[in-house]
């Protein structure tokens, strides 16, 4: 395995990249927040959409400094909302976290 590059090793081991694992974690945490299984310290609101199923609402604030806007854009509460809304309803409408994980893995692969 030493002669394989990073992406070939991931494929051989059957695991996701670090970025994909972080994105998966954010989506799962957002689902748990929508089900009140974990605290919602970010004040994210959830609503049902006929087309997209369960959706979260993103608070978009504007600051005078561009560096602050960049921090807001890359924060958990902003990036996780975008990822969660990008996932199809078939994933988000599952009744248990185990089913969500199965459907999410199908979607990501």
Image (cartoon, rainbow, N blue to C red):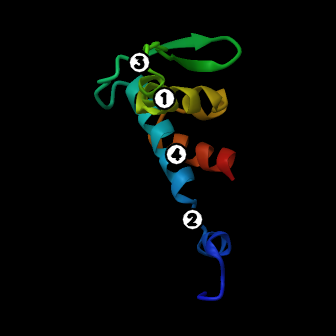
In the rendered image, residue 36, in percent from the top left (x then y), is placed at 34, 24
Marker disc for residue 2: none
Question: From what the image shows, is residue 67 above or below residue 11?
Answer: above
Residue at the far front: name it.
65
Image side of residue 6 versus residue 38, left or right = right
Find residue 41 and report its image quarter.
Answer: top left
Query: Marks 3 and 4: CB-CB under 8 Å?
Result: no
Q: Secondary structure at mark 1?
A: helix
Residue at the far bottom: name it.
2
Viewer-nearest residue: 36 or 61: 61
Res 26 visible = yes
Q: Would you name the residue on which mark 3 appears?
A: 44
- Residue at image coords 68%, 11%: 50
In the rendered image, residue 62, in percent from the top left (x then y), is placed at 47, 13
Image side of residue 84 versus residue 67, left or right = right
Query: Marks 1 and 4: CB-CB under 8 Å?
Result: no
Within-10-Å neighbours for mark 4: few <14, some 14–19, many 20+: many
Q: Would you name the residue on which mark 2 appears?
A: 15
Question: From what the image shows, is residue 81 above or below residue 99?
Answer: above
Pointer 3 or 4: first along the chain: 4
Q: In this rendering, which labeled residue sits more in front, label 1 or label 4? A: 1
Q: Would you name the residue on which mark 4 appears?
A: 24
């Amino acid at each position: 395995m030493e002669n394989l590059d990073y992406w070939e090793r991931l494929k051989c081991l059957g695991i996701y990249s670090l970025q994909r694992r972080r994105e998966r974690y954010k989506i799962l945490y957002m689902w748990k927040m929508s089900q009140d299984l974990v605290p919602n310290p970010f004040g994210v609101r959830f609503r049902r959409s006929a087309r997209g199923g369960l959706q979260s609402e993103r608070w978009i604030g504007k600051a005078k400094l561009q560096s602050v806007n960049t921090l807001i854009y890359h924060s958990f509460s902003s990036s996780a909302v975008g990822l969660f809304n990008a996932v199809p309803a078939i994933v988000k409408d599952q009744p248990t976290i185990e089913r969500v994980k199965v459907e999410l893995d199908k979607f990501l692969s």
